[in-house]
Amino acid sequence: MPAAAGDQAGTVPSTAPPARFATVLGLAAVALVVALHWVLPVTDPQTGRVTTAAAAALVLAAPLALLAAGIAGCGGPAAIARPALPFAVVAVPLIDGAARLLWLPAALAALTLLRPALLRLHARWRGAELAATAGAAVVADLAGSPVAVVAAVWLAAYQAGLLVRAGALDRLRPRHALMVAAAGATVGACGLVLAAVSGRPSGALPSASVLLGCTAAQLGLALAARRPIDRWTSGAPVAGGLAWLAPRLVTVHLWQLPAVALVAAVAVRVAGYVPSETFDARWRSDLPWWLLCAAAALATAVRLIGRVGTALPRTHRLSGSSTLQAHGRLEA
């Protein structure tokens, strides 16, 4: 009887604001990208110049952010462009491969414009569009178009977020979500093995099987963890922190790379530091101060550039009728 009651409870739709859940997913996606660049950055030991993570790694980290954007939106193209434009001017010419970090904001801006059409598509197809986009990714892979594969899978991830927001996946129980995650991880792992056997370059964009499997794994884990996430974010301190962080996630996603690049340049050129290339004892001893310095540089960038990205329009004035929403925007 308790097990049956637990199963029934698992099918009750969540009443927590979806924006909080989406912000946690977006934070997890950004944390993954930050780890790619901060834990073991690709640093030239002579100049301290930092290179961004491989395209495949950034592409595989993006579906979770797209899922989050599908659930709660991302503030519109203007909100994305404000932190992206200074990054394009300052970081792209100075950091090798920095333009790759603009792929996700560009996709978010395009999908935000398409959101009304995608909502109508879901109202008509009732979730079948996910199978259609997955099939399109497979066809694009067979046709040898990796960019089209990425576009189709990213669209599927965003559309999955719309399904979550619409409540279409509320009846998916946690254990079933974990089964989806396990199946996706298995498909992705098989795709990686096939890529290695076929001699596919390690830095190339992932195949449809790898990207679809990774996306399914991320979606399944996110849905399985939704109730614990909702309970964790129900407290005022956590909810307030997420409301502050939500409009700054794009800024953090972009400017974490210049932050670690600045730390590397100063450490190598000024202090004569020689970066470690392996996970050895010296790497472990250096990691805390490396992360602390990079975090301080990122906090400064978010404070300066975040003001631009989250500033209210001149015509908007705070009044007694204005309220702070869970996604961090002021609305009258």
Image: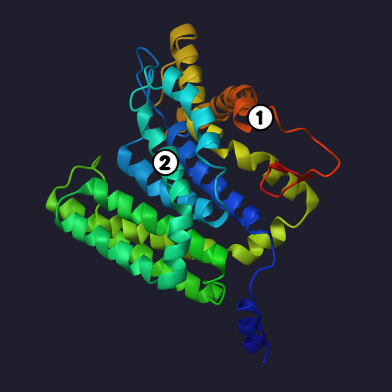
* Quadrant of the snapshot with the N terminus: bottom right
Residue sitting nearer the eye, 267 or 145: 145
Amino acid type, label 2: Leu
Mark 1 is surrounded, within 10 Å at the Cα level, by few (under 14), some (14 to 19) or many (20 or more) other residues, namely few
Image quadrant where residue 202 sits: top left
Farthest residue, direction front: 315
Q: State the residue position of label 2.
A: 104
Residue sitting nearer the eye, 324 or 13: 324
Amino acid type, label 1: Ala
Q: Position of residue 199 (x, y in %)?
A: 14, 48
Q: Position of residue 52 (x, y in %)?
A: 37, 30
Mark 2 vs mark 1, CA separation in Å: 22 Å
Q: From where the camera sits, is residue 221 visible?
A: no
Residue 311, numbered circle: 1
Q: Position of residue 223 (x, y in %)?
A: 54, 65
In the rendered structure, which disc, 2 or 1, sits on the residue that comes first in sequence? 2
Q: Secondary structure at mark 1?
A: loop
Q: Position of residue 245 (x, y in %)?
A: 65, 40
Residue at left 63%, top 84%? 8
* Quadrant of the snapshot with the C terminus: top right
Residue at left 79%, top 35%? 318
Question: Closer to the camera: disc 2 or disc 1?
Answer: 1
Q: Secondary structure at mark 2?
A: helix
Farthest residue, direction top: 270
Q: From where the camera sits, is residue 169 visible?
A: yes
Measured along the vertical axis of the image, is residue 227 above or below residue 325?
Answer: below
Mark 2 is surrounded, within 10 Å at the Cα level, by few (under 14), some (14 to 19) or many (20 or more) other residues, namely many
Residue at left 47%, top 34%? 39
Q: Is residue 62 left or right of residue 187?
A: right
Measured along the vertical axis of the image, is residue 189 above or below residue 270?
Answer: below
Image quadrant where residue 317 sits: top right
